[in-house]
Amino acid sequence: MFRAYFEEYADAPPDIAWFERLWLATLVLSVFITIMMFDWSVSRFGRYIAALLTSVRFGGTFLLMLFCTRRKSNFLRWVIAIPFSLIIVAYDGIRYPQMVERDPVLLLVEVRLVLMFAAIYMLFTPRSRAWFASRPVPEG
């Protein structure tokens, strides 16, 4: 049933696998950041809305990765690169004063941003660009 869904992914360059690994690492770090900053979200939105927004954010981020790589979506590659990364940076900017008070959170956010931009870079390597354009992937 799902075989056709993954056959196209079989010819993906290693850069795409690296993108997924780095993206999942950012999600893991985001879980820890969210746990440490959840009281801030609750104070802004209330317990239930904060939990709902957090669930939607994590689910959307995971689906964005899957639709980009598994469906070979060039459009979603650009969505991840520009609007999504700007939203994450702006969201971290809003919470910056609270993060400064919590030293480990600030360090985790910085590491997450580095991993996120490294993952996005993997979407724009020459092999990845060729793969998204359905051209032959250059070797090496």
Image: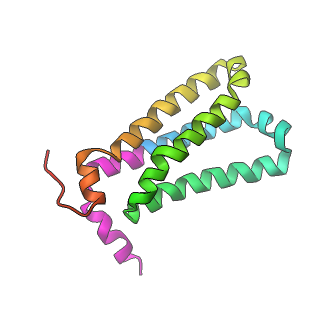
Q: Residue at x 35, y 77 (%)?
A: 4
Residue 105 visible in the current orientation: yes
Q: Is residue 3 above or below residue 96?
A: below
Q: Residue at x 57, y 27 (%)?
A: 108
Q: How many marks?
A: 0
What percent of the width, then of the height, locates residue 89? 58, 34
What is the quadrant of the C terminus in the image?
A: top left
What is the quadrant of the N terminus in the image?
A: bottom left
Q: Residue at x 38, y 46 (%)?
A: 19
Res 46 → quadrant: top right
Residue furthest to the bottom in view is 1
Examine the structure image and report whether residue 78 is included in the region drawn in magenta: no
Query: Who is closer to the viewer here, 44 or 29?
Result: 44
Residue 13 visible in the current orientation: no
What percent of the width, then of the height, locates residue 66? 46, 59
What is the span of residues highlighted in magenta in the rendered image? Answer: 1-21
Examine the structure image and report whether residue 14 is included in the region drawn in magenta: yes
The colouring scheme, among rainbow, by chain, secondary structure or one colour, is: rainbow
Query: Who is closer to the viewer here, 105 or 116?
Result: 116
Position of 44 with respect to 116 (left or right) is: right
Q: Main secondary structure of the magenta part?
A: helix
What percent of the width, then of the height, locates residue 31? 62, 41
Q: Is residue 122 above or below residue 39?
A: below
Query: Who is closer to the viewer here, 53 or 84?
Result: 84
Position of 57 with respect to 15 (left or right) is: right
Q: Residue at x 49, y 44 (%)?
A: 82
What percent of the width, then of the height, locates residue 18? 34, 45
